[in-house]
Image: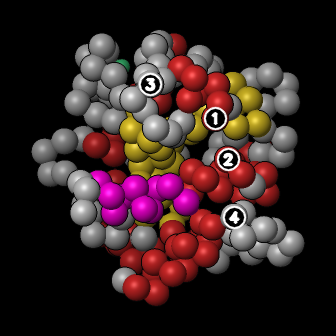
């Protein structure tokens, strides 16, 4: 199995659902400080992809820069980045750390704390591959079964959503199979754990 593929399997359904399902996108944003923009915020996925190198296969995965040496950027990355545009024109970013259930926070790195520093850094000087935005929030996506273990790190993130929260999301009615992908895939994954 490719390195990082388990994490990818946990991050991709979330990214896809944010892109394809307006109700899911709004549900996620309502759990952040951008709740007032939750309805009607547009994900700038195409614009994000266009800014990235041709080697990047997704708009969302693994955003980082080593051009900035601040504590948020140096040796760190954002697992899943999403930049949105509110109806009023405000552009804001969501930096998401994704921990698959068997993963842990590295012992000698301030990985959790780096998210807030990096999110702040990029609102004033984004990497060349990231579109400009004037505000940002952080989110931690993980398994509910690991919340106790991750407790010292949780307060470093603006919000926490679990795979179980997504699996239990009740906005499914009337949606296509594709739109159901994140909740459905997490349900299947949780059943296997
Ligand atoms: Zn920086």
Sooner in the amino-acid sequence: mark 2 or mark 3? 2
Looking at this view, is 35 or 7 the one in front? 7
Tell me the element at label 4: loop
* Residue 6 counted in the magenta span: yes
Q: Is residue 53 above or below residue 16?
A: above
Q: Which residue is mark 1?
A: 45
Q: Nearer the viewer, mark 4 or mark 1?
A: 4
Q: Which residue is mark 4?
A: 178
Q: CA distance from mark 4 to mark 2?
A: 11 Å
Residue 149 in view here: yes
Q: Indicate the position of residue 70 as horizontal and vertical percent values.
A: 29, 19
Label 3, residues with CA under 10 Å away: few <14, some 14-19, many ≥20: few
Q: Indicate the position of residue 129 as horizontal and vertical percent values.
A: 47, 19
- Per the rendering, the mark at residue 19 is 2
The residue located at (51%, 81%) in the rendering is: 188
Q: Quadrant of the C terminus?
A: bottom left
């Amino acid at each position: 199995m490719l390195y990082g593929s388990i994490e990818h399997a946990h991050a991709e359904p979330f990214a896809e659902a944010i892109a394809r399902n307006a109700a899911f996108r709004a549900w996620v944003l309502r759990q952040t400080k951008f709740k007032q923009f939750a309805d009607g915020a547009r994900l700038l996925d195409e614009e994000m992809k266009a800014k990235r190198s041709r080697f990047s296969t997704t708009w969302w995965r693994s955003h980082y820069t080593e051009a900035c040496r601040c504590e948020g950027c140096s040796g760190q990355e954002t697992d899943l980045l999403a930049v949105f545009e509110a109806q009023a024109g405000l552009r804001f970013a969501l930096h998401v750390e994704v921990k698959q259930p068997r993963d842990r926070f590295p012992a000698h790195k301030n990985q959790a704390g780096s998210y807030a520093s990096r999110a702040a850094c990029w609102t004033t000087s984004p990497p060349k591959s990231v579109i400009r935005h004037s505000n940002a929030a952080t989110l931690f996506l993980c398994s509910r079964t690991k919340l106790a273990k991750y407790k010292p790190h949780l307060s470093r993130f603006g919000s926490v959503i679990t795979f179980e929260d997504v699996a239990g999301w009740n906005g499914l009615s009337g949606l296509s199979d594709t739109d159901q992908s994140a909740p459905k895939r997490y349900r299947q994954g949780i059943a296997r754990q």
